[in-house]
Image (cartoon, coloured by chain):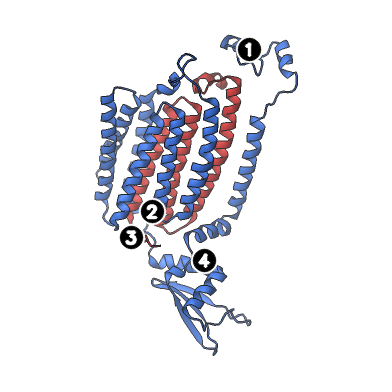
């Protein structure tokens, strides 16, 4: 990989992001959009040139579609002046990354993402946005407030983003050649066989499909069925009714599905993390309830006012009285 | 497994680059937006980007702990959304503004 290329790519991408952040004229925005799409295409092509491999044209087209939707919706999300539209654009990002997860054969994660993110988390955001939505001034309720329209320090933010992105791109371009090779068919089948051995019901039904005379359950004298794998499939050794040893070859499709793998890993390999996640959710629920509850005692506000402290729930107070309150 | 054509390095590097770009957009948004809620939305965007990288790398090695980790990311994101929005509601009650710069006196 050419040493300078990642930096130029990142610069092009973030320069167009800067043009979009600047709230300039229509022409600069169009330039920003064109530049952004162009630099995305450039990154795509440059990445394809560096390494040869991969098949499946349909997949690449879908990847491009989802990727462009994700990135452009993300850019629109951080440039739109109305927070509600930002949240809607974030839904686009979530949906297209769910599409990417489908391309990666992670069906369970794709649907979990749609349900949890697009369904639950974004609705929470929408509630709070609707609750706290503001107009720029009482006279002009159609325009967003000034802090939503004007970006804070766009040049500094884009510079930080540039430094970060060049670090990431440099690491990816340099490191991807040195990665260990991907899992081949034999590793995949071994992983499938390992999990399938524990899924007794599925193992039994898939054996019965292939070889009905196979003896099941395994014999009582501790003679277990043995499951093993090579690069063509999964094999089970057991006994027939006549008592002979018999090997049954199961196709790879007899192996566990994506969701079964994820469930097996989740419960079998990371049980403590799973419980920890439960604790985190419980504590977050407690925290949200406690934080959002009105916490003042009856009459506490009057007491605070009497000793010269800020009133907790006085919406009309201006900044000067606030200063006095905190200094007192 | 119908879609199981070769998933070589070509695809992995593309997914990683896409995830890097999304993360950077989220980072820039977090730094330059001034609305508290949009800032939190940008952190969610960064979570998304990390999730894509996890799932792609997990698919590359046929190791499903990548997806398991995305489940934990979802958990943390949900918890973070609940707590952060509760905090925003609390702040909004004190002073009806979502502008992050209105709350710079919190650092004292």
Check contact, mark 2 vs mark 3: CB within 8 A: no
Q: Secondary structure at mark 4?
A: helix
- For residue A218, what is the image quadrant? bottom right
Check contact, mark 4 vs mark 3: CB within 8 A: no
Measure the C-alpha gap from mark 4 to mark 3. Answer: 23 Å
Measure the C-alpha gap from mark 2 to mark 3. Answer: 12 Å
Q: Secondary structure at mark 1?
A: helix
Q: Chain of mark 3?
A: B
Q: Chain of mark 1?
A: A
Residue at 35% x, 41% y is A69
Residue at 42% x, 65% y is A187
Q: Identify which residue, A202 or A304, lies in the foreground.
A: A202
Using a 10 Å C-alpha cutoff, classify the residue at mark 1 as few (fewer than 14 neighbours), some (14 to 19) or many (20 or more): few
| Number of the label disc, if any, that sits on residue A103 | 2
- x, y (%) of residue A237? 50, 80
For the residues carrying marks 1 and 4, which lies nearer the camera in this image? 4
Question: Which residue, given by chain and number where applicable, does mark 3 sit on?
Answer: B6
Q: Chain of mark 2?
A: A
A238, above or below A7, in the image:
below
Which tint is chain B?
A: red
Which tint is chain A?
A: blue
| Residue A39 appears in the rendering | yes
Rendered-image quadrant of the C terminus of chain A: top right
Q: How many marks?
A: 4
- For residue B94, what is the image quadrant? top right
| Number of the label disc, if any, that sits on residue A57 | none
Question: Which residue, given by chain and number where applicable, does mark 4 sit on?
Answer: A195
| Number of the label disc, if any, that sits on residue A327 | 1
Measure the C-alpha gap from mark 1 to mark 2. Answer: 58 Å
């Amino acid at each position: 990989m050419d040493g300078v290329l990642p930096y130029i790519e990142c610069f092009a991408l973030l320069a167009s992001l800067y043009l979009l952040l600047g709230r300039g004229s229509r022409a600069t925005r169009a330039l920003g959009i064109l530049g952004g799409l162009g630099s995305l295409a450039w990154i795509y092509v440059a990445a394809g040139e560096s390494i040869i491999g991969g098949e499946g044209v349909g997949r690449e087209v879908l990847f491009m579609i989802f990727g462009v939707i994700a990135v452009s919706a993300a850019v629109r999300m951080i440039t739109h002046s109305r927070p509600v539209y930002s949240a809607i654009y974030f839904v686009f990002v979530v949906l297209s990354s769910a599409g990417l997860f489908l391309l990666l054969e992670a069906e369970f994660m794709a649907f979990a993402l749609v349900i949890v993110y697009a369904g639950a988390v974004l609705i929470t955001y929408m509630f709070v946005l609707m609750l706290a939505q503001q107009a720029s001034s009482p006279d002009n309720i159609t325009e967003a407030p000034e802090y939503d329209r004007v970006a804070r320090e766009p040049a500094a933010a884009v510079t930080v983003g540039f430094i970060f992105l060049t670090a990431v791109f440099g690491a990816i371009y340099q490191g991807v050649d040195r990665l260990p090779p991907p899992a081949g068919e034999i590793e995949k089948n071994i992983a499938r066989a390992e999990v399938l051995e524990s899924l007794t019901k599925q193992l039994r039904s898939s054996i019965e499909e292939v070889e009905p005379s196979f003896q099941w359950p395994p014999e009582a004298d501790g003679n277990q069925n043995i499951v093993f794998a090579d690069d063509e499939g999964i094999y089970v050794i057991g006994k027939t009714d006549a008592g002979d040893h018999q090997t049954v070859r199961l196709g790879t499709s007899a192996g566990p599905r994506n969701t079964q793998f994820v469930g097996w890993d989740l419960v079998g390999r990371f049980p403590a993390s799973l419980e920890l996640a439960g604790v985190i959710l419980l504590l977050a629920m407690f925290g949200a309830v406690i934080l959002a509850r009105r916490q003042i005692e009856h009459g506490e506000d009057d007491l605070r006012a009497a000793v010269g402290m800020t009133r907790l729930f006085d919406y009309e107070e201006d900044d000067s009285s606030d200063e006095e309150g905190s200094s007192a | 497994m119908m879609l199981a054509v070769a998933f070589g390095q070509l695809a992995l590097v593309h997914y990683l680059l896409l995830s890097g770009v999304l993360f950077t957009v989220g980072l820039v948004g977090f730094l330059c937006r001034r609305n508290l809620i949009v800032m939190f939305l940008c952190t969610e965007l960064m979570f998304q980007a990390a999730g894509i990288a996890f799932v792609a790398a997990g698919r590359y090695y046929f190791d499903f702990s990548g997806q398991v980790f995305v489940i934990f990311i979802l958990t943390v994101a949900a918890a973070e959304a609940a707590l952060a929005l509760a905090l925003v509601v609390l702040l909004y009650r004190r002073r009806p503004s979502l502008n992050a710069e209105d709350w710079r006196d919190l650092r004292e």
